[in-house]
Structure formats: C-alpha cells, structure tokens
Image (cartoon, helix red, strand yellow):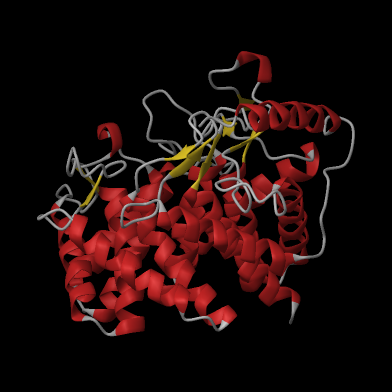
Amino acid sequence: MAEFTFLLSESVKDTFKNMFLTWGEIPQIKDSDKLHLQKTIDWIEEASVHGDGGVSSHYSLITGDWLYPFPETTGYIIPTLFDYAKFSGNKKYSELAIKLTHWLCDVQLDSGACMQGNYDRRKGKTSPIIFNTGQNILGFIRAFEESGEQKFKESAIKAGDFLVSSTDDKGVWDKNLHRGLKHTINVRCSWSLLMLNQIVANDDYVRVAHANLEWAMAQQQPNGWFKYGTSRIGGLPNTHFLAYTCEGFIESYRITGITQYLDAAIKTASKMLELFDQRKMLYAFWDENWNNRGKRFKFLKGKFVCLTGNIQISRVWMQLYEETKDEKYLDAAFKMLNFVKSLQDVESGKKGIEGGIKGSFPVYGSYSTLMYPNWAAKYFADALLLKIRLSEK
C-alpha cells in the first residue's frame, strides 16, 4: 500500500527544510550515534526479511512495499553486518551475514560474475557487470575470513578470475560495463582484487588492479573532478560515484602504500570539503567546473542532496583524517553526519521508513526518488561505526 500520507508530509517538511538551508545553518543532531546506528541496522535486517534471500534494494514510498533483492549491494552489506556484530557483541548479525553470503553464492553467474540489477527469481539472472562483481568479492572475502567456509573463498576466486578476463590488452576493463562505458568507480574493484591477492596470491589480480587505478588517475582533472566519473552517457558524476572513486583509491593505498592513490583521493575529497564549507550543502551532480547541476526536476535547479553520497564522503573525510591527522576532515565529516541524523526517522515505528535513509533530500530529489535504498543505510552504518570509534579515542 502506497505511503501517500507520509509521502506528502515528508515532501512538505523537506521543502521547508531545503528553503531554510538557503539562509540558515544545516540542522545538527550531535548525540545519539549509537541509537541511530542501531535503527539503521534494524532497517537493514528488515530489508533482508523482505529480500527473498538477499537484501531488498529499496523500500518504495510509491508502492509502500519492498523491491527485489540487489546482489551488488548485498555483497558489500555483508562486511557491515560482521562489523556491527563485533561492535554489538550480538552474533545474530554475523549469522545473517553468513546467510546472505550463501544466497550470493547461489545467484552468482557461472562465469563468476555478479549480475546486473535486482534479482527476480521469476526472470532469473541477468547480464554480468564488472562493478557489481567487485562488490561481491568484498562480501565473499569477509565471510570466508569470519567463517572459514571454503565455498566463499572459491566464489571470490571465480569472481576475481572473471574480472581479469574482462580487460583489454593493457589490463583495463573494457567489457561487461554499465552501458558499455568505462568509469572511474571501478577502482573499488581494484581494491577487491588487491584484497583477494592477499588471500590467493595471483599476479594477474595485482596487474589488473593497478592498471585500472592508473587509468582512473589519468581521468582526474587538475581541480579534482573526474572525467568518466559516471556510468551514464552524457551524464555528470554525482557525490555517490565521486565517493566510490575516492574509496577505491584510499583502500588501495592502504594495501599497497602507493601514495599517488592517496593523493588522488585527497585532491577530490578536499575540493568537496571546500564546496561543503562554501555552500553549507553538498549537492548531488557536478560538472567539470564544480558547478552543481540538476537532473529531471528543473524546479530544483540542482539543489538537492544524494544522501548516500554525502554519507560516503563523510566517511572518506574520516579516513583522510586517520591518514593525515588534519582536523578539518574530521570536523566536516561529523557535521555532515549530524545533518543526516536530523533527517532519519528513529521513532515512528513505520516499517520501511524508521531507520532508513532517503535516497534524496528533499525526498523527491533526482536520486532514488521517493525511495529508501539499502546502500544508503549500509554506508550510514559504516560511517557511524567509524564516527563512534574516532569519537571515543
């Protein structure tokens, strides 16, 4: 049943909040990190109940129901659940992670790849995608490390071998790409291959990982913006994809120690911090001159937020604080997360809404419009876990 009443009230509230932000300070909830974290994990658990074995991709305010499971994001939700199990001391979350990994093995393509899009058992598996496969490797590796189940290691190797087989003669991915386009977010798959190499030494994993990291660095402009930073023809990169790229560089640096990877992340993340400081908000889509642009709804004039991207970049800033000890990254990250907390429902009791994170602010913005995506919740949990750890030091 559609959530029309809630949708209307949330749209009105978001409209006024967005108007206020043009002249006021962004709202902050500075305490209760652990409450917001628990509510977020509860939402992910509920999404798994409705995920037909995996994790439902979204809760939709349009239909008032959960969508089909999403293998890509189920893959990288698995490490989040293991992290929360360790944080909370509650093994039910690690058990859920193991259960999801078994499902991920079941829907893995024979080639070792992860399929594109949501999984509808009535329609079966769809075409293979590089990026999704890399995210599954993260889940397979963590589940293997936590459980010792060889099945998970074997699935990770199959996925890694698929990534190696999908390159050109320079080792750069040129097939099984979203819309056939090369794009920089695949550095997260480089990170996956470097992790896999730590378990199963394979020179091809290392070769392909570095080839794609170097290709992505070559797309970075002097101002930190990335050419080919989106998977859409003629599209512009959004904060979600820019943060994906920064994450891949940071994690690859942490494994290899190659400072150029860290420098690439710093260049982009620092520009986004500058924009956040200047504008009080970090909007969704950015052109090559770092002007924010709209998508679909012209009346918004580009002034809407991809909450997933903002959460991700806050975590990137915290990671850069860990590497550089520069307090500006920590201050901005905490401010960003405290703002997102002000938008999260933690008390209504509404299934699919309480504990979830909207795709956009306002809720009708042009990213996961009128929906609560599972990856927004995943990244919010990751960011809050890191925020709590840094706050307690």
In the displayed structure, 290 sits above or below 298; it is below
In the displayed structure, 221 sits above or below 111; it is above
Q: Quadrant of residue 125?
A: top left
Q: How many marks?
A: 0
Where residue 7 sits in the image (x, y, percent)?
A: 64, 29
Where residue 157 sits in the image (x, y, percent)?
A: 18, 69
Q: Quadrant of residue 314?
A: bottom right
Q: Is residue 252 visible?
A: yes
Q: Looking at the picture, tell me which residue is in the foreground, 218 or 216.
A: 216
Q: Looking at the picture, tell me which residue is in the foreground, 63 or 222.
A: 63
Q: Quadrant of the C terminus?
A: bottom right
In the displayed structure, 142 sits above or below 295; it is below
Where residue 366 sits in the image (x, y, percent)?
A: 55, 27
Q: What residue do we see at 62% from left, 52% from top?
A: 311
Q: Looking at the picture, tell me which residue is in the foreground, 36 or 179.
A: 36
Q: Residue furthest front?
A: 1
Horizontal relation, residue 101 to residue 113: left or right: right
Q: What residue do we see at 27% from left, 55% from top?
A: 133
Q: Is residue 257 visible?
A: no
Where residue 363 sits in the image (x, y, percent)?
A: 63, 32
Horizontal relation, residue 284 to residue 208: left or right: right
Q: Residue furthest right?
A: 24
